[in-house]
Amino acid sequence: MEENKQNEREEIHSQRVRAGKRTYFFDVKATRSNDYYLTITESKRKFKDDGYVYEKHKIFLYKEDFDKFKDALNETIEHVKTELLPEVDFSQFETSPAPAEGGDSSEGTELKWD
């Protein structure tokens, strides 16, 4: 496990999105050659053996795919909003932005993995 931590890349930027029992992390990391990539992690809290465990799923997204991924995600979300759920007022789900650097870290983007 310790060896795996040493192989992890330093986070350049991190954004957290809380969603009920799930939390999504958007982390920018650098390769050894100072190229950047994005990891998207879903962490889901589950009850197991008298306590909670966190099930994690991770996607690695490289710079050459950023625009294709963003476009497909936006088009898919727009399809759901306009074609499948046109009666839903999605503004009811909007939240205020996370605090800026130096703000309340309990609600910000400072959470790091163990």
Image (cartoon, rainbow, N blue to C red):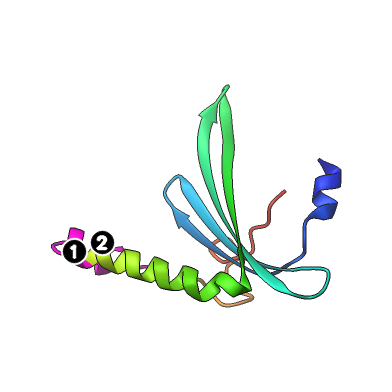
**Residue at 54% over, 73% down:** 66
- Cβ–Cβ below 8 Å for labels 1 and 2? yes
Residue nearest the viewer, comparing 51 with 17: 17
92 in magenta: yes
The residue labelled by disc 1 is 83
Direction from residue 21 to residue 110 in the image, left or right: right
**Residue 62: x %, y % from top left:** 63, 68
Pick the residue in front: 62 or 8: 62
Q: Which residue is mark 2?
A: 80
Q: Residue at x 52, y 40 (%)?
A: 45
Q: Quadrant of the N terminus?
A: top right
Q: Residues within 10 Å of mark 1 (few under 14, many from 20)?
A: few
Seen as rendered, the residue at the extreme top is 49
Residue 45, numbered circle = none
Query: Picture coordinates of residue 109 (x, y %)?
Result: 59, 66
Which residue is pictured at 51% across the width and 52% down the height? 23
Task: Say whether residue 97 is visible.
Answer: no
Name which residue lies at 77% across and 68% down: 31
Query: The disc labelled 2 sits on which kind of residue?
Result: Val
Q: Quadrant of residue 102?
A: bottom right
Hey, which quadrant is residue 27 in on the image? bottom right
> The residue under label 1 is which amino acid type?
Glu
Rendered view: 37 above or below 1:
below
Magenta span includes 79: no
Q: CA distance from mark 1 to mark 2?
A: 6 Å
Q: Residue furthest left?
A: 87
Look at the numbered disc 2 and give the secondary structure of its residue: helix
Q: Which residues are magenta?
A: 82-96
Let me know if residue 79 appears in the view.
Answer: yes
Disc 2: CA contacts within 10 A as few (<14), some (14-19) or many (>=20): few
